[in-house]
Image: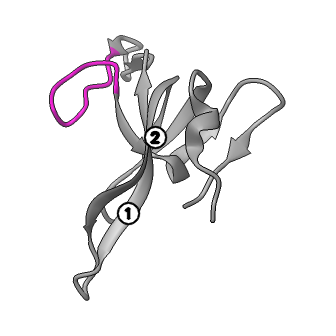
């Protein structure tokens, strides 16, 4: 049984953002405020549930546009600076160096 992601609470992380087809869009950085293991995020072609461990990241830093102006991260609900992300897309960026996760 894989370890649950509770050790990520309070850690500074970099989240890699992808399109639905798997193309990398970029990254954002913030702090993990909550974890939720085993969340149903969809179904595979055979109808079987797909579950992922998720982390809630807050204090997401604003990115910059081509002119260098800040562009805040806005999640799918329209809330700025926070959102749920799959643990597999997270890298810890503090402490003893980068750590990658998979589920």
Q: Main secondary structure of the magenta part?
A: loop
- Residue 57: % across, % down: 43, 28
Q: Is residue 23 visible?
A: no
Q: Which residue appears farthest toward the right when viewing the image?
A: 96
User: Residue sitting at 57 percent across and 43 percent down?
Assistant: 5
Corner quadrant of residue 22: bottom left
Give the magenta range.
Answer: 71-82
Give the SS element for disc 2.
Answer: strand
Give the total number of marks visible in the rendering. Answer: 2
| Residue 7 vertical placement versus 18 (above, below) | above
Read off the residue under disc 2.
Answer: 26
Q: Nearer the viewer, mark 2 or mark 1?
A: 1
Q: Is residue 36 visible?
A: yes
Read off the residue under disc 1.
Answer: 51
Q: Which residue appears farthest toward the top when viewing the image?
A: 69
- Using the image as rendered, state which of residue 7 and residue 77 is in the foreground: 7
**Alpha carbon of mark 2 to alpha carbon of mark 1: how far?**
24 Å
In terms of sequence position, does the residue under pointer 2 or pointer 1 come before the other?
A: 2
- Using the image as rendered, state which of residue 81 and residue 36 is in the foreground: 36
- Residue 36: % across, % down: 41, 43
User: Residue sitting at 25 percent across and 26 percent down?
Assistant: 74
Q: Is residue 31 left or right of residue 56?
A: right
Q: Is residue 29 left or right of residue 36?
A: right
| Residue 45 vertical placement versus 16 (above, below) | below
- For disc 2, the neighbor class at 10 Å (few under 14, some 14 to 19, many from 20) is few
Give the SS element for disc 1.
Answer: strand
- Using the image as rendered, state which of residue 38 and residue 101 is in the foreground: 38
Q: Where, quadrant-wise, is the N terminus in this rendering?
A: bottom right
- For disc 1, the neighbor class at 10 Å (few under 14, some 14 to 19, many from 20) is some
């Amino acid at each position: 049984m894989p370890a649950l992601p509770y050790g990520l609470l309070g850690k500074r992380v970099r989240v890699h953002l992808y399109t639905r087809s798997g193309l990398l869009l970029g990254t954002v950085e913030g702090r993990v405020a909550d974890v939720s293991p085993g969340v149903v995020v969809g179904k595979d072609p055979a109808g079987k549930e797909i579950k992922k461990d998720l982390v809630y990241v807050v204090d997401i830093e604003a990115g910059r546009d081509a002119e260098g102006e800040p562009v805040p991260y806005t999640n799918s609900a329209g809330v700025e600076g926070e959102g749920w992300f799959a643990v597999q897309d997270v890298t810890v960026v503090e402490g003893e160096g980068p750590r990658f996760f998979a589920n």
